[in-house]
Amino acid sequence: MTLNVDEEVERLKEEIKRLAQPRPDGSYVVKFGVLFIDDRCANIFEALVGTLRAAKKRKVVTYDGELLLQGVHDNVEIVLLKPPTQATQAEGVGA
């Protein structure tokens, strides 16, 4: 089963919510090592690092650095950002 990038980013959001700790601001945080060693993520994502980079580029997640490597970056926090509210989206249209 091949997913396109947008579908993979959506699946990544679901998996981060499953594994992460919610924050009071509505975002979620999980360490890279937790995502990387999770069996379910390993079965879904052929290239987890590539999916994370695509999600970062789309401002869905944020994390320090550009390239994450298993072992070296296991403690890097991946933050699933809170989606913009309808009001925020509407304000951005007229700007």
Image (cartoon, helix red, strand yellow):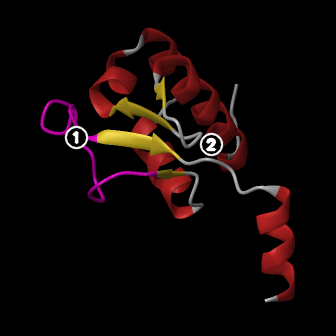
Which is nearer the eye, 60 or 24?
24
Q: Secondary structure at mark 1?
A: loop
Q: Quadrant of residue 66?
A: bottom left
Q: Earlier in the sequence, mark 1 or mark 2?
A: 2
Instruction: Report if residue 73 lies within the magenta region.
Output: yes
Can you give x and y, in whole percent of width and height, for residue 69 in the image? 22, 40
At a point 57% along the width and 26% down the height, the residue shown is 17
Please give the residue where the numbered disc 2 appears in the rendered image: 9
Q: Relative to 63, is 52 on the left or the right?
A: right
Residue in the picture at 31% in, 39% down: 77
Label 2 sits on what residue type? Val
Q: Residue furthest top?
A: 39
Viewer-proximal residue among 73 and 18 = 18
Where residue 18 appears, as percent x and y from the top left, is 56, 18
Residue at 52 percent across and 36 percent down: it is: 24
Residue marked by disc 1: 69
Seen in the image, is 50 located left or right of residue 33?
A: right
Indicate left or right for 71 with 34 as reference.
left
Expressed as whole percent of the image width and height from the top left, the position of residue 10 reads 68, 38
Q: Position of residue 46 (x, y in %)?
A: 49, 31
Q: Amino acid at mark 1?
A: Leu
Q: In this picture, which residue range is highlighted in magenta?
A: 62-76
Using residue 93 as the reference point, say whether residue 12 is left or right of it. left
Q: Using the image, determine if residue 54 lies above or below residue 79.
A: below
Q: Quadrant of the C terminus?
A: bottom right
The number of discs equals 2
Query: Where 52 sits versus 2, above or below?
Result: below
Quadrant of the rendered image containing residue 36: top left
